Image (cartoon, grey):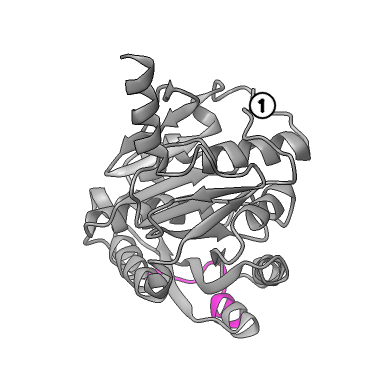
Amino acid sequence: MSEQQRAELVTKLRGPGAAQAPQQQRTFFTEGSTTVIAIASGKGGVGKSSVTVNLAAALAAEGHRVGVLDADVWGFSIPRMLGVSGQPVGFNDMILPLEAHGVKVISMGFFVPEETPVIWRGPMLHKAIEQFLGDVYWGELEFLLVDLPPGTGDVSISLASFLPGASVLVVTTPQEAARKVAELAGKMAERTNLRPIGVVENMSSFVCPHCGEATRIFGEGGGAEAAETLGVPLMGQIPLMTELREGGDTGTPIVVSDPDSPAGIALLETARTVARATKTRVGRPLTLLAGPGAAAGHAH
């Protein structure tokens, strides 16, 4: 391609006016039709990433255009859970995401071996999130799900600074200890200009694979209490099933492999509830804000 053709293609991918946009305010998703939903949890081990990939696959199965940004830079697991591997292609400083089950995906797991730890502090994490948001060609998405690391650290704060007003879905288990910490994640979202929209209670009960009986291993009521404390609805209660865990290991979400299972049905219903709750956001443009004098940069 000639230089002119390359420049015209980049303009088309990034949107009109992107090249002339001032560095301190870069336009993110110029079509203004993307709803960003950050999936947060107060602590690890509550199944946040499992919920993320299944909600994404469920939304895609419903005909929506969906992307997943794996913002858990230290503990990335989205590539394995969605069964996607390889290295994204770069073009004129843009990154083309990979795709699985109809979902576009970007993750640090595409750039480092799975067994290699990422030992980064705040500034590098901030730059990585900025690049994943601003330098990846997502196309015309309806939903971008962001899998946050557990807690209320650097990545969550960076996302809030780049996307003020984005929605947050809090994941917890029924257990009291998980519920209390999940509430902290929801309160952090409110204080950083993010918008909590609901709570998902994962591992609500264990469904016996032999008799189908449900046992509440982690107690009950944690999701409802967290939702009440945060003033948002309880959007779903997901049972724990062996097939749900197996799907995460093999890269086939249960909403794809067994949508009629108790967990598959619960996740599909949760996805529909989330889509309905956030539809008022669709059509509003989102702005990617960078610090004064900051450039897009790359996370090497």
In the rendered structure, which amino acid carries the disc numbered 1? Pro
Which segment is the magenta one? 214-225
When asked about the image quadrant of residue 182, the answer is bottom right
Q: Residue at x 35, y 29 (%)?
A: 8
How many numbered marks appear?
1
For disc 1, the marked residue is: 117
Q: Does the magenta stretch include residue 81?
A: no
| Outermost residue to the top | 2
Q: Is residue 162 left or right of residue 146?
A: right
The residue shown at (55%, 75%) is 223
Residue 179 on image: x %, y %: 65, 71
Q: Which of 96 and 209 is in front in this view?
A: 96
Height in image: 188 above or below 227? above
Using the image as rendered, state which of residue 44 and residue 295 is in the foreground.
295
4 over 151 or under it: above or below: above
Where disc 1 sits, the SS reads loop
Q: Position of residue 216 (x, y in %)?
A: 49, 71
The answer to whether residue 83 shows anywhere in this view is: no
Side (left or right) of 236 relative to 151:
left
User: Is residue 222 in the magenta section?
Assistant: yes
The spot of residue 270 in percent (x, y) is 37, 69
Residue at 61% in and 62% down = 164
Q: Position of residue 58 (x, y in %)?
A: 30, 57
Is residue 245 among the parts visible in the rendering? Answer: yes
Q: Quadrant of residue 207?
A: bottom left
Say left or right for 151 vs 275.
right
